[in-house]
Image: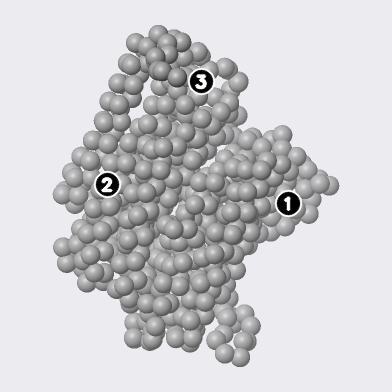
Amino acid sequence: MTTTTLAALVPLLPFLGAVAGLAVGRTAPGFVRPLAILPTLTAAVLAVIVAVRQGGGRAIDAATQLTPTGSVPIDLALHLDGFAVLVAVLVTVVATCVQLYSTAYLRDDARYPSYAALVSLFTSAMLLVVYSGDLMVLLVGWEIMGICSYFLVGHYWETPEARAASLKAFLVTKLGDVPFLIGLFALAADTGSFRITKILAAVGNGGLDHPTVIALLLLAGVAGKSAQFPLHTWLPDAMAGPTPVSALIHAATMVAAGIYFVARLLPVFAASGAALVVLAVMAAVTMIGSGLAALAQDDIKRVLAYSTIGQLGYMSGALAVGDRGAAVFHLISHGAFKAVLFLAAGVVIHAAGTNSLAAMSRMGGLARRIPDAFWTMTVALLALAAIPPFAGFFSKEAVLVAAEHTALGDRSVAPAAAGWTILVAGLLAAVLTAAYAVRLWLLAFRGRGAEVPDHGKQPAAMTSVLWILAVPTLAFGLTVGMIGDWFDGHDLTPSLTTAVLSTGVTLVGGLVTFGAWRHTAALAARTPIGAVAAHPG
């Protein structure tokens, strides 16, 4: 088969799995699990083959006219460049792990057939966004993900929290999608095409008449989809859904779509210096605000949700300084370790019987009860905090190096103000990230009190995927010197200055948090149980 044929099968297989799963879910429930796992697993294998064939070289394009419109045509087009094929591998691998994990996590759930089908449809929609070479076809996948998130976040619809969270996610993202759609039409009107290659060619020839207006309209949709300030509020509330859904949304679909869209159309945004400054400010506020919010959370999943918002801020920051290679590098790296964090959090919650970090801090022996989750989550938190040699260190450094070059005037794509904004905010966010990562680890795994009840051995379907995803968390960053061809040939290796500076502030954040925890624990140990401070009235 040709590469384009294989690529067309990658989003098609999960879609067919979703249709088949819905069709036989009630009449033949024994087929539901194979229909959830096998099409997505096959799509992952095909995505790897496509990536190997593409090889990070020249982009592969194929198109056929979908329908005559009388004006701007809509094409069923594929655009396979280094970014697209690597992101597709991330999406399919994470989705396969989520489906496998869900067979155990939701084994007693009566609505599992519809859940599994929606996860497959969600995966197919994201793959359509990744591979599509036409913005109208991309929009189809973009909107299907929105409706899938509504149903999946609201899976436990009996609870008012899930109902409210699903509605909020839908409405907030739609709030961004309205100007996003107007921006797509304005972009097509200026360039005469919905085809990405033709749009970029027109932009290169100065064909945009209203670059700032178009870029800002599109950024509204990106802010909603990728949970960036001020449309970020839906993502923490979406934790009301099943934990595997959280892993899928945060690691490989939905929130990654907005970042990927800007990366693919970066010349459109780079045509307006004002738009890049707006994106830089949005990213900076997101990074710092989400870090502060994460420090104040008690729910383990909400801490991880705010961490996702902050890491997406780093990706937006890389795009604001005109480096899409660094943005997509961090997107892929983040996808691996964030999937580990959420899936491991599901094991922790199952073992502890609660989402509350405060409650976990009063339990002893949790790390011994769930060694798989403990070790893989420790590795993933180190990657989140950007400690070398984990993947998160190299990808976050690529963002900071790009900001440094822009701030010092070494690159002309973005204003220097955008570079300084991202560099300063990135370093402050590094301190906060280390602080809340260490706080989560200490409260969850170093609790003092009665032994946590033994809920039995965790199913292999849940623990095995943690180790599968821990491999890229450990190893992906080490390939930094060999994968430049996949990222426009950019050098992604860290510079000594930013590496020392960011690692230093990260260690400060982690050590201060550890010291505060030790001090609090010592005070608690010296306070007699039941002691109450005297207070008049």
Q: Residues within 10 Å of mark 1 (few under 14, many from 20)?
A: many
Q: Is residue 181 left or right of residue 273?
A: right
**Residue 438 can be seen in this image:** yes
Element under disc 3:
helix
Q: Residues within 10 Å of mark 3 (few under 14, many from 20)?
A: many
Q: Which residue is mark 2?
A: 428
Q: Could you tell me residue 109's position as x and y percent?
A: 71, 38
Q: Is residue 116 left or right of residue 125?
A: right
Mark 1 or 3: the one toward you: 3
Residues marked 3 and 2 touching at CB (< 8 Å): no
**What's the amino acid at mark 2?**
Leu
Query: Of the numbered discs in the image, which one, if any, rests on residue 369?
Result: 3
**Label 1 or label 3, whichever comes before in sequence order:** 1
Q: Which residue is mark 1?
A: 21
Q: Which residue appears at 53% of the width and 32% of the height?
A: 355
Q: Which image quarter is the N terminus in?
A: bottom right
Q: Could you tell me residue 276's position as x and y percent?
A: 32, 68
* Res 51 quadrant in image: bottom left
